[in-house]
Image: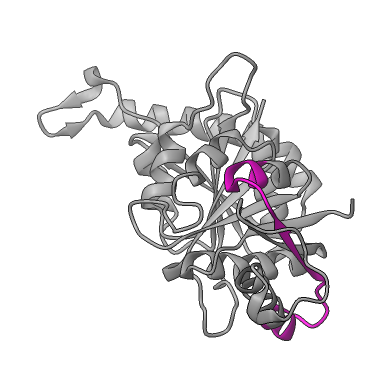
Amino acid sequence: MQPVVTVGLDGSPGSLAAARWAADEAEKRRLTLRLLHAWPMLAPEPAGVPSEVDQNYWSKRLVHTAQAELQAHHPGLTVVGDLVAEDAQEALLHAASDSEMLVLGSHRLGSIASYFMGDVSMPIVARAERPVVVVRAETHDQGTGSAPAGRVVVALKLRESCDEVIDFAFHSAAARGVPLVAVHGRSVPLHAHTPWGVDHHVSEEMTKDARTELDRVLRPWHQKYPQVDVADDIRLASPAKAVLHASEGATLLVVGRRAHRHGVAPHLSPVAHAALHHGRCPVAVVPHE
């Protein structure tokens, strides 16, 4: 199958914002955009039935309307509709497995919820085999259909392999022509706290060590993506808090997730949870080994 960006479409403001973001992304990456609408009650395709008695009329109209809008704003982009008569979660997980990325919409700060996929978004993010991007309606410029220029921010742990996360972040920054900021948060140990703050020597040494380690991790990626300007952001704070602060004003936040292993329940890290619930820009959750 030709590489695609798939977006879950349900007609909510969040899913429409996700579709617009996904169209921008597909165009940047020169991929096909697939609009997926899953609904278990879809009837078998009737032959020669007028629209007023077609049980699938509203589902078709939803997809066709979005397709027409996106095609008008992106005339060179291939946009295909896909109506699937199955459970939304299973349909989206299956679609994610053969997509470059899956894009989902969120329309409310503090939760990921919508009529169509509110109860399934978090399980999809936690289980998908490929990157999942969550887009909020209020953070996408619906007037122009374009994501704002800015920077891509990637959250890095440094103590585990996360090549998939780094590659996704560099590729995203290169496709947009924007800088990449690699952020790493590290909590200060209790013994370093003093009545007047944090021991200066401890904080200086921790920052120096983290920067040295981060430089080592990023060195091969500078060579692979020489066109991307990269900056580091070392913060002596909890990783979740560091990432949220660093992502203010970003065009995309990239976080990692341990790939699901057989016998282990899928879950998201505290950083991914914080990013999805409190981040104010699109959040890409990338599985890695």
Q: Residue at x 76, y 49 (%)?
A: 99
In this image, 186 relative to 148: left or right?
Answer: left
Q: Is residue 7 above or below residue 1?
A: below
Q: Percent position (x, y) of residue 21?
A: 61, 67
Please tell me in which quadrant of the rendered image residue 235 appears.
top left
In this image, 177 relative to 146: left or right?
Answer: right
Q: Residue at x 10, y 29 (%)?
A: 195
- Towards the viewer: 57 or 229: 57
Q: On the rendered image, what quadrant is the C terminus found in?
A: top right
Q: In this view, does 285 lie above or below 32?
A: above
Q: Magenta part of the protein: which range? A: 69-93
Residue located farthest toward the right when viewing the structure as drawn: 1
Residue located farthest toward the top when viewing the structure as drawn: 263
- Towards the viewer: 93 or 137: 93
Q: Is residue 58 above or below residue 156?
A: below
Q: In this view, does 170 lie above or below 235?
A: below
Q: Percent position (x, y) of residue 152?
A: 57, 57
Please tell me in which quadrant of the rendered image residue 90 appears.
top right
Exactly how many numbered labels are in the figure? Answer: 0
In this image, 240 relative to 48: left or right?
Answer: left
- Towards the viewer: 171 or 229: 171
Q: Within the magenta stretch, is there residue 223?
A: no
- Residue 253 visible to the viewer: yes
Residue located farthest toward the left when viewing the structure as drawn: 195
Q: Which residue is drawn at 23% across and 17% down?
A: 191
Q: Percent position (x, y) of residue 286?
A: 62, 40
Q: Within the magenta stretch, is there residue 75?
A: yes
